Image (tube, rainbow, N blue to C red):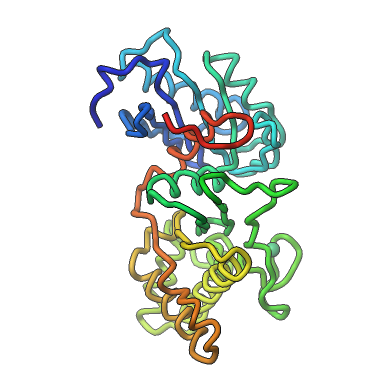
Amino acid sequence: VSGADHVHPAALRIGLDVGGTKTDAIAVDPAGEIVARVRRATGWGPDGVVDSITAAVEELSARLGADGVGFGSIGIGVPGQVEPDGARVAHAVNLGIDSLDLAAAVNARLPGAVRIENDVKAAAAGAYALHGATGSMAYLNLGTGIAAGIVVDGVVWRGSRGAAGEVGHLSVDPAGPRCRCGQRGCIEALAGGAAIAERWGRTSALPVRDVFDAADAGDPAAVALRHGLAQGVAAAVRVLVLTLDVDEVVLGGGLVGLGARLTEVVDAELRAGGGASPFLRSLRLHDRVSPLPAGSPAAALGAALVGAADPTGVLAHG
Ligand SMILES: [Zn+2]
């Protein structure tokens, strides 16, 4: 974190990852380096969210001596459905937003071009940049829910209606647990943090970690939940590679905080899947999966890149 002194604020791109509990905001210089980072709690509802975004950008502004100048662009990743215009967000239930022209609401408070993106798609763009990836990559977000973002040659693949990568609602077990989407045995019903916490049923600040601890101690219900999680993640990796043949599947999201405890059970499940199938084995799925480091700024960085992107969706590089 240096070099900001020599860069005019108008050349800096701002990226924000607005989560249900915290907002992560960064400033990126033309070389792609992060020159400042601010984290603060996220307010509730349209006003609370806009207040949090404004306060985070003003704090970056104060730190970088940019008061009143305005940054080059502001990109914002949000957990919700974002329309292709990059302005309006809908169904952001974790933020208390039903429908809002977030770009206009932010622009009423801050100068500069504002662009909104779905948080997982933003994180996919950020992970691609952080990995120095070329070709294709899938980013698989393992959090409260499960979703993927797909990047091909540096461009986030949105699909015709923005639903590309919603692998969490692929049913892999017709007799499996009921999913909040109405189906049974969705990948998200097996591997989503909220679904696991609900079926575990015990109150805990970190329910999935609690499940892993209990599984280590031999609790049969916890062992079954942990196995379901591994099966769900492995199924998501399989479908991403078999559909897109991506070079790499990068894991991110809150569950990645479990570190090797998570990657080991996923790795074992992927290897077991290859055990009976020379075809699957030849794809070397376990070699293509890698986690983001805990606390990675991927989502905020991706938002900064998306915010600075031209309307064709091609990432701007400096
Ligand atoms: Zn579902």
The picture places residue 36, in percent across and down from the top left corner, at: 32, 29
Q: Residue lying farthest top?
A: 68
Residue 180 in the figure: left or right of residue 224: right
Give whichever of 216, 245 is nearer the camera: 245
Residue 22 in the figure: left or right of residue 98: left
Residue 75 in the figure: left or right of residue 28: right
**Residue at 36% across / 27% down in the picture?**
29
**Residue at 34% across / 31% down in the picture?**
31
Give whichever of 172, 127 is nearer the camera: 127
Tally the marks.
0
Q: Quadrant of the N terminus?
A: top left
The picture places residue 143, in percent across and down from the top left corner, at: 51, 56
The picture places residue 93, in percent across and down from the top left corner, at: 64, 43
Instruction: Decide: is 277 above or below 99.
Output: below
Residue 77 in the figure: left or right of residue 38: right
Instruction: Decide: is 21 above or below 176.
Output: above
Q: Quadrant of residue 58?
A: top left
**Residue at 40% across / 63% down in the picture?**
290
Q: Residue lying farthest bottom?
A: 276
Q: Quadrant of residue 84?
A: top right
Instruction: Decide: is 309 above or below 294.
Output: above
Tell which quarter ligand 1 is in: bottom right
The picture places residue 287, in percent across and down from the top left corner, at: 40, 72
Q: Quadrant of the C terminus?
A: top left
